[in-house]
Amino acid sequence: MKKSILVMMVLSLAVTLPATAQFGKLLGKGKGAGKKSGSFATVWESEFDNKASRLALCDGNGQFIIGTDDNSASVIDESGKTIWSGDYKKLTTNKTNNSEYQYTIWKEKGGYLFLFDARKLGTDRVAVLDLESGRELWNSELYQDLIPKGGAKKEEGTDDGELETVKYIYELDSFLISQRNSVILVKANTGEKVWETNRFKGGVGKYIYDAKRNEIIMVNFKPTALGALFSGFKNQLVRINAVNGDILWDATFTGTIEKELVTRRAIIDLWIKGDKIFMYLDGMNVYDYNTGQKLWSATYENDMGGANGGLFSGGRRSKIYRTLADPLFTEDAVYLVMLGTRDRTKYVEKHDLASGKLLWASEKITGAFCMPNIYKTGDKIMVQVGGKVQVQEYRLEETSNGLSAGMALGGFGGGTMKQWVPYIYWDYKAQKNSVLALDDKTGTTAWRSEKFDKRITDLIIDNDKTVFVGDGDEFYGYDIASGNQLFDVKHNDAKVGKASDVIDFGDRVVVLSEKGLAAYNKKDGTRAYASDKIKGVDYFYHIGDNYFLRDQRNSKNIIYGIDMANGDTKGSVQSKGKGGSPKYGSGIDITDDGEYIFAFKGKKVEKIKVNN
């Protein structure tokens, strides 16, 4: 079942809409084909009753497929037959109509369609529809200022992820709604208010539900929609009784919770380990679960950023993420990748989990733009020095499919218009790449590989004995205990481009590359296969038992299905339609088991089978 809340918002500047183009074009033999080209089979082609210009996606099982525009929705079933459709003003008793925000919240069967009508004159309207039947579950005009209104505020609030002021709590089947002076818990299926507290203000940046205690641990942040309304706002970490909303304790913290450029995910993490709460924000902060008392902290900067101009200046704006590894927890310790505040060097620290005592710090590592992964294997801590980083960006692109003139940035010159299109992809930065092995007891360097000139992939650890890694043009195997190089294979001989990632696949390592795949046997590094070239690969998905590659070059979106056992291309789908899941790109959604792909354009829907 899909756990994500998918939201699409149309602004007057069309910032977050995906690019539009040709409907689900199946690619078989010919351009883009792999070692052995197959073709996906079309199960059916169907149509929504309306034109899907806002949402177009399936639930995780492919039982329900929804298409919406600003004013209506249409839902079809897994066989392509319409279940229900209608205009919002007729489906809702409060005549919710022009919905700037629309959520789909999927459950085991069906789910909710959340509609928000932000009226310029009058009272804002909220309505929730049952996705299985189209029946209105509830509506309200009690909740105001849920999204920014007008001018710069609206642009700042551009959000292709969750609505900042509404958080769906899956475990409680409820919404947490932020208002000016309080936070309200509302049952998702009835709209009934469960509780309200004025001791917690702001949007929910992150939460953990503790089922044993029926409690919620959550942190807040200042949402754009309510920012101008707040007075005396403070950063809060709170423990809440989920039954009645009682605040059992609250703790304040310093720091600013930022949001990612495209996904709008709050850059903060929470973990519960025993009787302690670990919060990542500008370092590690540890609190006593029972009292909220801060126990210890390890403060360090992060170097995410890399802005490229303003969102509305020039043709591109970029931000870089995933530069530092997530904390590595064991039963009695936590390992942190640190960024020095003065010399910008990076190093690893090991802290006692209970007391926070610094047990050791590794050597300082210069010349590393990122250290995205660390691994514990036996008596060693393996550190990946260098590697790929995630880039999130908006590009100003021309499209030929018309939208309303008010949404065009550059008008309709020659039947085209300019539009901000979101992209998420992985990239490499020049740095001193290598594999580093630290002694787990002392933190001293056990061994370090030679410096890789061009790049370094993630590491594959095999049975605590060997580590496999690529540097773009070569593929290596190392003995973890001694650091001895077991083999060095010329990956560029596979003629599939530079290595970009590695995939653990049984007794082989599959090297995902810029133009295809090559697989190597773990025992000796011999090449098992190499695929024919695929023009451009920028993302990789492992869904169920299926593997996919994606190519988003030149405003296209092509998904390739790959047989990892032999490198054959099962088939591919090209789509530039609207909608789809942000995870897979414009016009495409995939079921949770990876067995079916849905391609969208306008009223049309195509269901595609991955395995024939």
Image: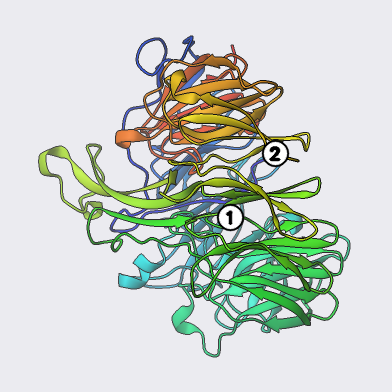
Q: Is residue 526 above or below residue 435?
A: above
The residue sitting at 60% across, 81% down in the picture is 254
Which mark's residue is nearer the viewer, 2 or 1?
Answer: 2
- The foreground one among 406 and 74 is 406
Q: Which mark is residue 128?
A: 1
Can residue 551 be seen from the camera position used here? yes
Q: Please state which amino acid type lies under the numbered disc 1.
A: Val
Q: Which residue is mark 2?
A: 109
Would residue 584 appear left or right of 155 to someone viewing this image? right
The residue sitting at 49% across, 54% down in the picture is 263
Would residue 26 appear left or right of 60 to someone viewing this image? left
Q: Secondary structure at mark 1?
A: strand
Circle 2/circle 1 CB separation < 8 Å? no
For label 1, the crowd category at 10 Å Cα-Cα, with few meaning under 14, some 14 to 19 and many 20 or more, is many
Q: Secondary structure at mark 2?
A: loop
Q: Please state which amino acid type lies under the numbered disc 2.
A: Lys
- The foreground one among 105 and 37 is 37
Q: Where does the image place residue 275, in percent across and percent down from the top left?
A: 86, 69
Q: CA distance from mark 2 to mark 1?
A: 16 Å
